[in-house]
Image (cartoon, rainbow, N blue to C red):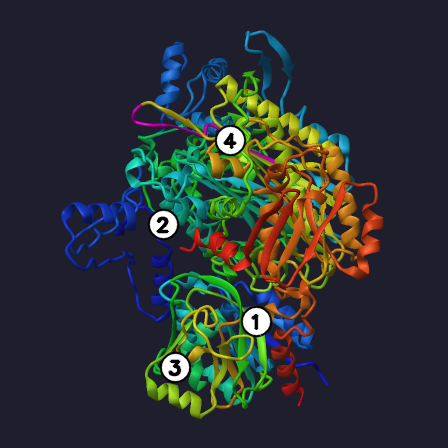
């Protein structure tokens, strides 16, 4: 059987595309980095891929708001193609800036790119600390339906962002996300308990670090799984306790899901 | 706060794009920031708050009411070729012309230009004069370092003559060491060494001091932006894989009233500089992995901003291959009036009027423009579409094309250069320092293909001429009219060989020896809180140090990831275990006392840091970056000679060649009252090493209770320049600890072997604050506890307790060894100055005793809090 194909979407200012491609290949994917302008020219090309990854970076400099301009581009030119992609049962993962793009295009939480959905239910805004921060966090894999996650486990990943504070529009949205098991990952401490800064590095409501769509096949999160696919990427690997590169799981599980 | 007309506004550019995406036509976008001040704020306070805190009047206008910016002025430009008559000028008039025209050339140089044009039988045009001034500027040609130096003693007698200072010191060491893994040294935009069979790495460190003094955010951002273009412009183009940054500031806690006119408050400078490096480096997706910050009041008028970039390039693309007839393509950002005169400006002294007079020398960067340019250039490189590449840095097209055209000549049509706005003169187009531009030489057969590569990702690229003229001259045209013509031989070889006078006499200051104390707990707390030593986590966390996925040893280490690491380790090729180790060393405190020893200390520190994590001395290269005062003053020049000679000695002794370097001279500031503040002689040494297996690296945090601690390297009695004297006596002393590079190399080589053999669990170098600080920092990372005895340190008999505890001798390490490796470790370090001083404990305290009893006994938490609170911003 042919290896499933993954598309790593690039745009002006994307900067985590190479390591994301590496992580995908390591998990068994055939992975290509493709510029958004090529996809806009020929949205039909998405048909050849089973997995779309929107990687981290500063698309269009994060000008206006993080992820906003690329999201705008997707709403304007790729809405139909992306909605078909999701409806076909394929996978989508947005990491950091990719998550911001997904929220601001409507791809999350409702798996539907449209002007109406964009920014409607939630947003990602400035960290409470007011600045960009790079640090490692612990996450509880919360959702049972999210195909990328080992449900119930505590994992470690780095965050590196300035605008990662997840804010749902209101209580209703929060409740719906919880009730439909769409809260994918939460910031916790090493023991799995919630905590203030820096356990929750940005002040996200309900410690939400990432959410998925109602099907569990579309995931966006602020932490970077592609930055923890080798033991030596962990900040404490020299102490000898690092047994597993947690970020690998995301790509391995996506691969396993797709090859059935 | 509205950006002044002509200042780059990246957000507006992105917004225009987004609006177009929505199918809406828009003429122009401008952005501004609005602040609302709550409470009772008088006019005077309002002015102070806005001018000093919120806006930078150099690039922004402040409006207190609703304000609509005027429509962009459509200026037209009617060509007018300007001649500058110099043929009949006398010496005084030539000097006046140099000064009024901000050419920063001396009389001999002006006369050389005068003679050249007399011979040519015409007067120079403005653009020719500007191009010569830029090509001959200190910034571009390093004439001080290439000068013939006469060293005099205090009686005025010449005691030594050194022809071409750099050739006979720093270059000489590289040549004599003749390392086979050096690929290209001191030739290209960065030094290039081997990485593996298919890749090479290059490294360049630059300074961007003067612009950062005036507009810290923009100055530092364009500093990073500029140095990132150096690797991209090295060989046939390297992909940036890591950034480094080192800053020098005055104390950020100094009272505002004491800040002289024309100078920004150091806290504001520091915040701006860190922000600029952060926003540009993070947006470029280059991890900022290593750096340092030093504080000294002499940096008040001249803060220093060093930015470095490491790049990765294919082994078969390390050299340019420019051909006659190749098209000149300008790629990236558009050209505007920004940064005019940057090269010459950076070569002069700052005064209190510079803040306004030279503000047009400040550029604002747009990282995304550079990122797009990088992405597409790498594609063009891999398709083999161009034959040479260089960056537009200081003096823009003038220096980029001028350099590339040295042997072939070129023809350039300036009216074809894409502009940000109309109205630029041909001269402004040629010397503009607008950011994010590079120049490529492209064989004619590839022009169409390469233009498509750029167009495909929305990057502007324009053919502006071609290389190769029959007579090897450079000719500039504007709408087909000749506006400039220069003989490449005169431009590149016509600079009169500079000569400099130097005098050096070692300072004669007292060497105080503070009275011995019973306990040094308070001393340690004070040193830990002092700004040079205190935790820089506030800065480090704002930088993305993990992007690109190659991170192995991060800048912060230990169980809570907040203890200092010695050096950065990263794997630039994700599929390979091979790694780069990157470190730095600098000691401006010693620069004033003894520039020779200071340079040895800087080299030793860079190498110590590198070896401490598992670096390979046998495959390690060095970079030198000198920031000095005005070297027309013989004492400054004397210190420079001392430092350059020490670089030679150190490179030879440690067997580590220099591969690249840069200098920034004239870092002096004249206050309104006429007082001159010169920076201390400040030499930054950066080191880069290639290792085979990243998984053999170690970190500085103490690992396991019961493990033994050793000190490697010898301690003596000298305390000069130590942080101990600084915090307890507010003095510097004079007795700089002498460095023995030959002995230190032996210690480093043994340590390297011990780490490679897996016998070392943790290692930290001893530097600022000596043993006491090293022990504390190792304890911060482990969170366990350490107990040791200074009496077991390797030292001559009779060395005092305070020196053992706090002296800052080079060549020393604190090493943790597990019981099962104890014998193996001792076998490797046999016959070297190594002492078993103690062990890792579970007491959560730092406990150091000496012959006289307990010297320090502090809870880790208390010491760490002192270390962290200084920059808890």
Could you tell me which chain the residue with mark 2 belongs to?
A: B
Give the label, 4 or 3, closer to the camera. 4
Q: Position of residue B573 (x, y in %)?
A: 68, 59
* Quarter assignment of residue B749: top right
Q: Residues within 10 Å of mark 2 (few under 14, many from 20)?
A: many
Q: Nearer the viewer, mark 1 or mark 4?
A: 4
- Residue labelled with disc 4: B732
Which residue corresponds to the image point at 60% horizontal and 65% vertical from the top-left? A18
The answer to which quarter of the image holds residue B506 is: top right
Residue in front for this viewpoint, B858 or B323: B858
Distance from the alpha carbon under mark 1 to that under mark 3: 31 Å
Q: Is residue B460 magenta?
A: no
Residue B8, which numbered label?
2
Q: Which residue is mark 3?
A: A114
Query: What is the quadrant of residue A75 in the picture?
Result: bottom left
Instruction: Have a look at marks 2 and 4 and say if they share a chain.
Output: yes
Query: Which of marks 3 and 1 precedes in the sequence?
Result: 3
Which residue is tagged 1?
A157
């Amino acid at each position: 059987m042919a290896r499933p194909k993954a598309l790593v979407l690039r745009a002006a200012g994307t900067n985590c595309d190479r390591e994301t491609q590496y992580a995908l290949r390591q998990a068994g994917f055939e992975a290509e980095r493709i510029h958004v302008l090529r996809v806009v020219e020929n949205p039909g090309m998405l048909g050849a891929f089973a997995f779309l990854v929107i990687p981290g970076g500063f698309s269009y400099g994060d000008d206006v708001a993080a992820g906003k301009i690329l999201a705008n581009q997707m709403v304007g030119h790729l809405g139909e193609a992306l909605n078909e992609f999701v409806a076909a049962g394929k996978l989508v993962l947005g990491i950091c800036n990719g998550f911001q793009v997904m929220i601001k295009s409507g791809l999350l939480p409702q798996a539907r790119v449209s002007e109406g959905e964009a920014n409607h239910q939630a947003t990602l805004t400035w960290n409470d600390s007011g600045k960009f921060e790079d640090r490692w966090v612990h996450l509880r894999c919360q959702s049972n339906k999210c195909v990328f996650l080992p449900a119930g486990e505590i994992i470690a990943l780095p965050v590196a962002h300035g605008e990662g504070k997840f804010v749902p529009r209101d209580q209703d949205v929060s409740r719906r996300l919880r009730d439909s098991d769409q809260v994918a990952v939460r910031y916790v401490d090493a023991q799995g308990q919630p905590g203030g800064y820096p356990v929750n590095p940005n002040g996200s409501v309900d410690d939400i670090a990432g959410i998925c769509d109602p099907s569990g096949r579309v995931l966006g999160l602020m932490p970077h799984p592609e930055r923890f696919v080798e033991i030596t990427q962990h900040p404490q690997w020299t102490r000898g306790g690092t047994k597993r590169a947690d970020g690998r799981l995301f790509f391995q599980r996506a691969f396993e899901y797709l090859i059935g | 706060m509205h950006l002044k007309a002509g200042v780059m506004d990246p957000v507006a550019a992105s917004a225009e794009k987004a609006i177009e995406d929505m199918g809406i036509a828009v003429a122009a976008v401008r952005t501004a920031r609005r602040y609302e001040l709550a409470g009772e704020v008088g006019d005077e306070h309002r002015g102070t708050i806005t001018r000093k805190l919120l806006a930078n009047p150099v690039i922004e206008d402040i409006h207190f009411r609703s304000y609509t910016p005027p429509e962009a002025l459509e200026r037209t430009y009617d060509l007018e070729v300007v001649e500058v008559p110099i043929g009949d000028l006398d010496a005084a008039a030539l000097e006046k012309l140099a000064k009024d025209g901000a050419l920063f050339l001396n009389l001999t140089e002006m006369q050389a230009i005068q003679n050249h044009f007399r011979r040519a039988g015409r007067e120079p045009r403005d653009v020719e004069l500007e191009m010569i001034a830029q090509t001959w500027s200190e910034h571009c040609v390093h004439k001080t370092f290439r000068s013939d130096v006469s060293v005099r003693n205090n009686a005025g007698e010449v005691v030594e003559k050194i022809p071409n200072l750099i050739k006979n010191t720093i270059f000489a060491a590289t040549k004599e060491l003749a390392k086979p893994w050096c690929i290209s040294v001191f030739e290209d935009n960065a030094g290039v060494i081997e990485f593996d069979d298919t890749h090479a790495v290059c490294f360049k460190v630059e300074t961007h001091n003067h612009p950062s003094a005036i507009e810290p955010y923009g100055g530092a951002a364009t500093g990073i932006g500029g140095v990132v273009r150096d690797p991209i412009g090295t060989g046939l183009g390297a992909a940036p894989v890591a950034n480094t940054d080192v800053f020098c500031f005055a104390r950020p806690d100094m009272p505002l009233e004491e800040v002289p006119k024309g100078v920004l408050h150091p806290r504001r400078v520091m915040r701006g500089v860190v922000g600029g490096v952060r926003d540009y480096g993070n947006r470029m997706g280059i991890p900022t992995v290593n750096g340092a910050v030093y504080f000294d009041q002499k940096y008040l008028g001249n803060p220093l901003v060093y930015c470095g970039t490491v790049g990765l390039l294919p082994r078969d693309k390390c050299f340019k291959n420019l051909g006659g007839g190749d098209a000149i393509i300008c790629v990236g950002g558009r050209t505007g009036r920004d940064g005019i005169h940057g090269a010459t400006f950076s070569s002069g002294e700052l005064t209190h009027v510079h803040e306004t007079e030279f503000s047009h020398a400040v550029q604002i960067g747009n990282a995304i423009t550079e990122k797009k340019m990088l992405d597409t250039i790498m594609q063009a490189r891999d398709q083999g579409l161009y034959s040479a590449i260089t960056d537009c840095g200081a003096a823009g097209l003038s220096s980029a094309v001028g350099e590339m055209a040295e042997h072939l000549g070129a023809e350039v049509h300036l009216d074809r250069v894409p502009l940000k706005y109309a109205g630029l003169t041909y001269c402004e187009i040629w010397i503009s320092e607008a950011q994010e531009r590079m120049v490529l030489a492209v064989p004619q057969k590839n022009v169409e293909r390469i233009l498509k590569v750029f167009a495909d990702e929305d990057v502007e690229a324009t053919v502006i001429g071609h290389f190769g003229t029959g007579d090897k001259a450079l000719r500039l045209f504007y709408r087909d009219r000749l506006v400039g013509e220069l003989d490449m031989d005169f431009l590149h070889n016509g600079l009169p060989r500079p000569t400099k006078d130097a005098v050096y006499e070692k300072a004669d200051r007292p060497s105080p020896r503070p009275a011995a104390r019973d306990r040094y707990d308070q001393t340690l707390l004070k040193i830990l809180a002092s700004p040079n030593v205190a935790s820089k986590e506030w800065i480090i966390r704002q930088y993305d140090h993990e992007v690109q996925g190659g991170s192995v040893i991060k800048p912060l280490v230990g169980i809570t990831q907040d203890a200092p690491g010695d050096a950065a380790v990263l794997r630039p090729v994700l599929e390979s275990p091979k790694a780069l180790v990157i470190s730095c060393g600098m000691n401006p405190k010693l620069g004033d006392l003894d520039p020779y020893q200071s340079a040895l200390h800087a080299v030793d520190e860079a190498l110590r840091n590198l070896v401490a994590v598992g670096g390979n001395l046998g495959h390690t290269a060095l970079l030198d970056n000198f920031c000095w005062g005005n070297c027309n003053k013989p004492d400054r020049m004397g210190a420079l000679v001392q430092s350059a000679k020490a670089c030679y000695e150190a490179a030879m002794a440690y067997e580590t060649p220099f591969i690249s370097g840069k200098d920034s001279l004239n870092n002096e500031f004249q206050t309104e009252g006429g007082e001159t503040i010169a920076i201390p002689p400040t030499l930054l040494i950066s080191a880069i090493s290639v290792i085979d297996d990243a998984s053999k690296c170690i970190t500085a945090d103490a690992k396991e209770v019961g493990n033994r601690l050793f000190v490697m390297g010898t301690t003596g009695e000298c305390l000069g320049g130590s942080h101990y004297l600084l915090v307890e006596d507010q003095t510097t002393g004079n007795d700089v600890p002498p460095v023995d590079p030959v002995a230190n190399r032996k210690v480093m080589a043994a340590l390297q072997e011990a780490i490679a053999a897996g016998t070392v669990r943790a290692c930290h170098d001893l530097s600022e604050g000596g043993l006491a600080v090293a022990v504390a920092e190792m304890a911060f990372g482990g969170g366990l506890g350490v107990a040791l005895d200074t009496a077991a340190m390797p030292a001559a008999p009779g060395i005092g307790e305070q020196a053992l505890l706090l002296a800052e001798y080079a060549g020393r390490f604190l090493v943790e060894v597990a019981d099962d490796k104890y014998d193996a470790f001792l076998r490797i370090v046999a016959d070297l100055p190594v002492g078993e001083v103690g062990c890792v404990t579970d007491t959560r305290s730092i406990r150091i005793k000496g012959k006289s009893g307990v010297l320090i006994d502090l809870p880790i938490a208390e010491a760490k809090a002192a270390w962290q609170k200084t920059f808890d911003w």
